[in-house]
Image (cartoon, grey):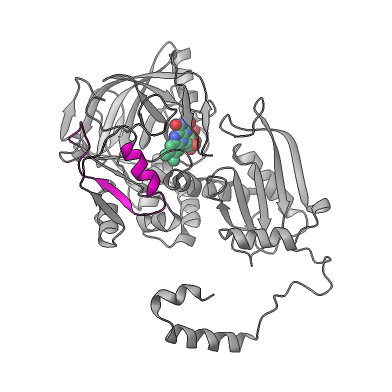
Amino acid sequence: MSDRQSIRPFLAVLEKDGALLRVPKPVDREFELSAFLSAADAGPALLFESVKGSSLRVVGNLLNSRARIASALGLSPSDIVPRIHEAIRAPVKPLRVATGVVQEIVETEAPLAQLPVPRFFEREERPYITAGVILARDPHTGRGNASFARFVIHDGRTAMVGIAPNHHLALFSRRAAEAGKALQIVVAIGAHPAIQLAACLYLGVGDDEIECAGSLLGAPVRMVPAKTVDLLVPADAEIVLEGEIDARQPLEEGFVSEYHGMYENYGPGFRTTFSALTHTKDAIYQAIEPGYHREHVYLGALPIAASLRSAIAVVVPNVRDVAVTEAGAGRTDIVVQLEAPRPGQARRAIFAAFAAVSLVKRVTVVDADIDPWDPVAVDWARVNRMKLERDLLLVPHAGTDRSESMEDGGLVTKAGFDATAKASDRVEGIERALPPQAQRDAARTWLMNNLPSERRGWLK
Ligand SMILES: Cc1cc2nc3c(=O)[nH]c(=O)nc-3n(C[C@H](O)[C@H](O)[C@H](O)COP(=O)(O)O)c2cc1C
């Protein structure tokens, strides 16, 4: 892969692997583009070559599985969480450069007017930008932050940004407003997948996700000064918007989709005014299908899993892996895998997960012989290794996020499932009933040699 820090090198890999489908037919931004992305949810990435009313191409469904994210980072799927965990512990500062391809074209007239922003779902009133990584600085400390939040388009310069009140960008916006100011921001679209993943990390206030992106990339993120605000922007991104969020100016949104797949109505967000659009000569606009769609799920899921892995390791050092389930949209339902847990450690891991990410409402703890990413294996452990009256923990009235589907006044009941094997439970032991290893190996070898390659997926 080339070292350009945008989505381009990954698009080339997808195309080579037959995982990118070009859509030459003209596509309408009003629901049609969204319908394509929704229909191809877990399938190929889609490159829309002709979008009505815009000269820019649009790509979507890039990072819609663990395998895709692994490929974008040059890793195997099981290495993603450990690699992000490492990146959190060894951040790499960005590199300031003088020029960047993202500034080949600069527009200041009506920065939003040219972008092919789709309208996604029936009950939503306006189109919105979903794949924008927003960079800002804490007005108190000057430290940086990177995160996603949607920009709902109002006119050529104005949008509403919808940020959960507990997110760091909302905190910075409120801090700027308290000082009587708007918060300067830049928004990078089509930045390298490592930058997009880092933006979804749950770190402390003041821990700059761009530095984790540098560590994940194995090279500092190249950043160039913005044209109209006092911030740096990722030099290789496809598109950058520059502007400011004013938390003193509310703008209504109406219904909006959430990761669980249903609509929410959060009321007003903050007015954002854009002062510039910059982009590469042949820019590709990235659209992430929101709601309960795989790219939205997995892009959030892997960084949340890694953030939890890091937080749980502080109190339970024998944590091996953390998985975030698709049913929980990669956010609310997690599985923690422990190596040889001692009595009581499963509960400590459950409490650590609840404490680290307020979205988490269900935690299952399994042993090292259960693959936490395999929902059937995890359910097997729940069915066969739990005495519910002893191993099911309910925590009523626990604080959660506004996006939680069952929240009531900011509270929800959280559940912990200790599905680890306990030594005293079964006199017969927990050994799996299987033929002897030597015969299993021999049978597997024969089948590998005699099954057509496309059928080998049957083999355990
Ligand atoms: C594609 C995508 C879109 C997102 N959109 C929003 C959004 O509209 N509002 C929001 O508050 N969080 C959104 N998020 C989640 C935040 O970006 C994420 O929780 C981030 O870690 C918050 O940053 P912080 O930890 O610096 O506060 C989105 C995540 C993804 C992957």
Rendered residue at 62%/53% (across/down): 335
Name the quarter where the N terminus is drawn: bottom left
Q: Is residue 428 above or below residue 438?
A: above
Q: Residue furthest top?
A: 180
Q: Is residue 443 above or below residue 111?
A: below
Front-lying residue, 312 or 449 = 449
- Which quadrant holds residue 179? top left
Per the image, is 299 magenta?
no
Q: Is residue 267 above or below residue 129?
A: above
Front-lying residue, 69 or 90 = 69
Classify residue 20 as left or right of residue 92: left
**Residue 420 visible (yes or no):** no
Residue 307 lies, in percent from the top left, at: 53, 46
Name the quarter where the C terminus is drawn: bottom right
Classify residue 259 as left or right of residue 114: right
**Residue 157 visible (yes or no):** yes
Residue 343 lies, in percent from the top left, at: 78, 58
Classify residue 355 as left or right of residue 118: right
Residue 298 lies, in percent from the top left, at: 46, 48
How many numbered marks appear? 0
Q: Is residue 69 above or below residue 414?
A: below
Rendered residue at 26%/47% (across/down): 47
Front-lying residue, 204 or 296 = 296
Residue 201 lies, in percent from the top left, at: 48, 42
Q: Which residues are magenta?
A: 32-55
- Which quadrant holds residue 184? top left
